[in-house]
């Protein structure tokens, strides 16, 4: 009788890849919606992107930079992409969601973010899965979940990387979450 291997329902690669799919879905929902629905969908998208990128910058990217061949160069490229996305996302926060400008910029951002996610999945995540043990990948997943629980909920361009997030992140998170509560956004 062959022994069946039980797999954990998730590790850091599975978790982040699933979030990439949720981000893609939220982009599509936001682009198809209008008015208040579009605004609500954009808030969910902005929040997920902010916490997702922060956790990657604090937990996953430093590990990849250390563990992977050419890791530092790979991560520098990902951080540059993340900064560009945060700048675009921040710009969209102050634009009427029903304007043509918003729609055009959101489409551009979607394309950039999905390309970025593809780089992460095919380069960084694939190599992490090869280099790290199953238990290390599960431990990273738990660390990412914890980082996301306290991450800022809005984009902060210029705050890329573990060190920048360690200094600015807690204050930014407190301010973002207070602002979200005042505006009535779900946490």
Image: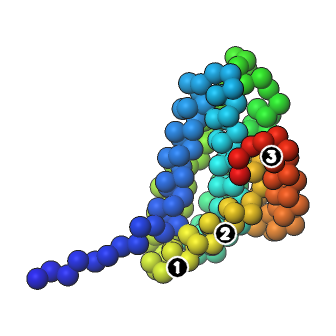
Q: Mark 1 falls on what kind of element?
A: helix
Residue 93 picture location, percent across and down: 79, 34
Estimate how packed mark 3 is, as few (under 14), some (14 to 19) or many (20 or more) residues with alpha carbons within 10 Å: some
Question: Where is 185 relative to 158, above or below?
Answer: above
- CB atoms of marks 2 and 1 within 8 Å: no
Residue 60 picture location, percent across and down: 62, 67
Circle nearer the viewer, 2 or 1: 2
Question: Where is 66 relative to 157, above or below?
Answer: below
Q: Residue at x 51, y 61 (%)?
A: 15
Residue 118 picture location, percent across and down: 51, 48
Estimate how packed mark 2 is, as few (under 14), some (14 to 19) or many (20 or more) residues with alpha carbons within 10 Å: few
Instruction: Report the front residue among 176 and 137.
Output: 176
Question: Where is 21 relative to 68, above or below?
Answer: above
Q: Earlier in the sequence, mark 3 or mark 2?
A: 2
Q: Is residue 93 left or right of residue 79?
A: right
Q: CA distance from mark 3 to mark 2?
A: 20 Å
Which mark identifies residue 180?
A: 3
Q: Mark 3 falls on what kind of element?
A: helix
Which mark identifies residue 146?
A: 2
| Residue marked by disc 1 | 136
- CB atoms of marks 3 and 1 within 8 Å: no
Q: Residue at x 83, y 30 (%)?
A: 94
Q: Mark 2 falls on what kind of element?
A: helix
Instruction: Report the front residue among 112 and 42.
Output: 42
């Amino acid at each position: 009788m062959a022994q069946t291997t039980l797999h954990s329902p998730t590790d850091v690669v599975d978790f982040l890849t699933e979030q990439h799919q949720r981000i893609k879905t939220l982009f599509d929902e936001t682009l198809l919606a209008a008015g208040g629905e579009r605004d609500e969908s954009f808030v969910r998208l902005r929040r997920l992107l902010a916490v997702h990128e922060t956790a990657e910058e604090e937990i996953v990217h430093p590990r990849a930079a250390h563990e992977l061949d050419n890791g530092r160069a790979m991560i520098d490229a990902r951080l540059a992409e993340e900064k560009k996305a945060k700048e675009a996302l921040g710009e969209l926060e102050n634009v009427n969601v029903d304007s043509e400008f918003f729609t055009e910029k959101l489409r551009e951002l979607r394309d950039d973010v999905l390309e970025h996610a593809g780089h992460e999945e095919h380069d960084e995540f694939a190599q992490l899965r090869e280099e790290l043990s199953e238990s290390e990948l599960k431990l990273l997943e738990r660390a990412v979940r914890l980082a996301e629980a306290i991450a800022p909920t809005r984009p902060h361009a210029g705050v890329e990387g573990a060190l920048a997030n360690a200094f600015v992140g807690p204050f930014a998170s407190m301010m973002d979450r207070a602002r979200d509560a005042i505006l009535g956004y779900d946490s």
